[in-house]
Each structure stands twice: as structure tokens, then as C-alpha cells.
Amino acid sequence: QVHLVESGGGLVQAGGSLRLSCAASGSSFSGNVVGWYRQAPGKQRELVASINSAGVTNYLEFVKGRFAISRDNAKNTVYLQMNSLNPEDTAVYYCNVGLPGLFPRLLLFSWGQGTQVTVSS
């Protein structure tokens, strides 16, 4: 069974930075699209950023220029560098994986525990 493990969250002041990591035990990200999602209290989960196997990235408009997604295939890890954080970025952040052409309509794995990001004003 594949487990997605997100880490790197925490409490940071507005304007600060965090780097999140997503790792998968029991599977490889190779060839697949990996996305970072977030869910704020009372809101639906939303896709924040994604990266395919060629390194092509896509971002939610609200985070463009502030967040950067990257992948290290050797470590089977995907990162989300978050800069210039503001309180609206407060949420639980998750990652998930999909096949090219099917992402994000069809995701391959169950959701992990996520990692909490809290930005204070």
C-alpha cells in the first residue's frame, strides 16, 4: 500500500517562507504528475501547484510568483517552496499523484495526513 507523507509545515509570520516535502512510500513518482493541494478550514481542497515528469509546472493564480514546486526523482520527493506567505495561505497542505493526461481528474492514492501551515499576521 502506498503512503503519501507530507512534511515541513509549521507556524510562520506573514512574509516568511516554508518548504514542504512530499514523499511516497511504496511507489515512485517517476513518470507521473505530482500536485500540491491545500484545504483551509471550511473550504474545499484546492490544487495549488503541479509538476509533471518533464518538470513543467502549473500554479494557482493566487500563488504564482510566491510558490515554486520542484521534484527530485532520485529522492522520490516533491517540494513546495513557499515564500511571501500571508494569512490566506493558512491551510493543511497535501500532495497526490496522477497519470499524465488524467491528472487531476483521477488521483492514484489516498490522501495522506497533510502538513499544517499557519501564517500569522
Image (cartoon, rainbow, N blue to C red):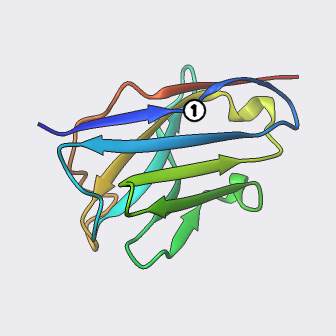
Q: Which residue is mark 1?
A: 8
Rendered location of residue 20, percent (x, y) = 57, 40
Outermost residue toward the left in this view: 1
Question: Eyeballing the image, is 55 above or below 113?
Answer: below
Query: Callout 1: few (<14), some (14-19), or many (20+) C-alpha neighbours within 10 Å?
Result: some
Question: Eyeballing the image, is 73 above or below 107?
Answer: below
Q: Quadrant of residue 86?
A: top right
Rendered location of residue 6, percent (x, y) = 44, 34
Residue sitting at x 88%, y 22%: 121
Amino acid beneath label 1: Gly
Residue sitting at x 29%, y 44%: 24
Q: Secondary structure at mark 1?
A: loop
Rendered location of residue 25, percent (x, y) = 24, 40
Give the side of residue 70 with respect to residue 24, left or right. Answer: right
Residue sitting at x 57%, y 32%: 8
Give the side of residue 120 with respect to residue 55, left or right. Answer: right
Outermost residue toward the bottom in this view: 54
Give the number of callouts.
1
Question: Eyeballing the image, is 38 above or below 75?
Answer: above
Rendered location of residue 34, percent (x, y) = 39, 57
Q: Quadrant of the N terminus?
A: top left
Report the front residue among 101 and 29. Answer: 29
